[in-house]
Image (cartoon, rainbow, N blue to C red):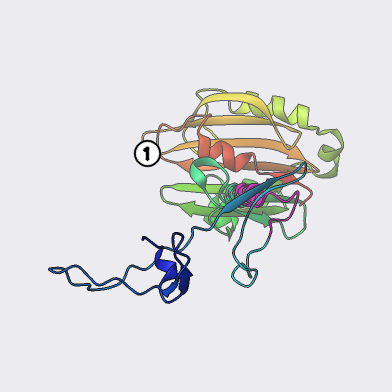
């Protein structure tokens, strides 16, 4: 009779004669040698997917100790989304810092200068300006400026450009201060420095127009000669005449981006 391998070593009854006998392991057939016994394959673990109204998660039948350390994702906290938001925020903050510190024409770093008497502030490119005197900054008749009384000047040289601001008190004393206004001064400046006339920074004026600097009416001029050019603004404020601009290479126009960036950084009151 045939019996399963699990019956080896057990006593069973013959279904025909009812005689009990011991089931022994059959002898290997001649010509074959048993090298190793087959090892029964382990049953595969099953994966059970549990779905309910609130969460979707996978659970297996691995013992709890083997699963220790695996944390269930916290509900309503999309980690991937928060990481993405964090990266974008860092980029925006980084970009904000970059443009705040590198703003202006050609990504120049501007350093704010505040006048000693707090009357105005103005940003200069890449560092603090140097204080000038009438002798060091004025090219024309220096005596005219000496008679004006109050005088202040600062400049910073970058390459072949010189960034300058000059102020001096109105000629004529208190009587002139009482009648002078930004509008009156602008009209006088247009008549004095009209195209073809000598400009405030040397060379002939080629263009001029009325603009505003921090809400102050000003006259913007540009010009020069074969050796240099200039773009500047002149205006009247609180008893002073201000001249600020860039003295640089020939061919500068009134729309020169570096000059415009510099002059637009003037703020009255410091």
> How many numbered marks appear?
1
Q: Check the picture and name the quadrant holding the N terminus.
A: bottom left
x and y percentages locating residue 270 in the rendered image: 76, 52
Task: Report the magenta stretch's main SS.
Answer: helix
User: Can you tell which quarter of the image residue 171 is in?
Assistant: top right
Examine the rendered structure and indicate whether residue 94 appears above or below residue 63.
Answer: above
The residue depicted at 40 percent of the width and 63 percent of the height is: 3
Name which residue lies at 50% across and 33% down: 256
From the viewer's perspective, tell me whether residue 1 is left or right of residue 173: left
Check disc 1 and report its element: helix, strand or loop. Answer: loop
Residue furthest front in the image: 17
From this view, report whether residue 197 is shown above or below residue 130. Answer: above
Which residue, given by chain and number where applicable, does mark 1 sit on?
Answer: 227
- Going by the image, does 215 lie left or right of 196? right
- Indicate yes or no whether the magenta region holds residue 76: yes
Q: Is residue 88 magenta?
A: yes
Q: Position of residue 95 (x, y in %)?
A: 58, 48
Residue 54, percent from left and from top: 77, 44
Residue drawn at (27%, 73%) of the image: 36
Residue 233 visible in the displayed image = yes
Q: Position of residue 29 (x, y in %)?
A: 19, 67
Res 145 seen here: no
Q: Which residues are magenta?
A: 72-89
């Amino acid at each position: 009779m045939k019996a399963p391998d699990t019956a080896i070593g057990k006593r069973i009854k013959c279904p025909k004669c009812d005689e009990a006998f011991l089931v022994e392991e059959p002898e290997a057939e001649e010509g074959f040698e048993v090298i190793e016994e087959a090892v029964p394959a382990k049953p595969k673990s099953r994966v059970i997917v549990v779905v309910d109204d609130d969460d979707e998660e996978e659970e297996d039948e691995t013992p709890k100790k083997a699963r220790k350390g695996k944390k269930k994702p916290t509900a309503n906290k999309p980690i991937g989304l928060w990481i993405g938001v964090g990266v974008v925020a860092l980029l925006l903050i980084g970009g904000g810092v970059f443009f705040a510190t590198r703003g202006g024409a050609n990504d120049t770093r501007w350093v704010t200068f505040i006048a000693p008497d707090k009357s105005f502030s103005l940003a200069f490119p890449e560092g603090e300006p140097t204080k000038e005197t009438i002798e060091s900054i004025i090219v024309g008749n220096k005596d005219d400026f000496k008679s004006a009384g109050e005088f202040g000047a600062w400049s910073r040289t970058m390459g072949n450009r010189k960034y300058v601001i000059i102020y001096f008190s109105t000629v004529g004393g208190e009587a002139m201060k009482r009648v002078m206004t930004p509008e009156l001064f602008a009209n006088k400046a247009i008549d004095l420095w009209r195209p073809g006339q000598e400009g405030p920074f040397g060379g002939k004026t080629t263009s001029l127009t009325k603009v505003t600097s921090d809400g102050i009416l000003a006259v913007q001029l540009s010009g020069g000669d074969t050796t240099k050019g200039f773009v500047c603004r002149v205006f009247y404020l609180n008893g002073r005449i201000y001249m600020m601009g860039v003295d640089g290479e020939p061919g500068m126009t009134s729309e020169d981006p570096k000059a415009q960036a510099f002059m637009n950084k003037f703020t009255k009151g410091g």
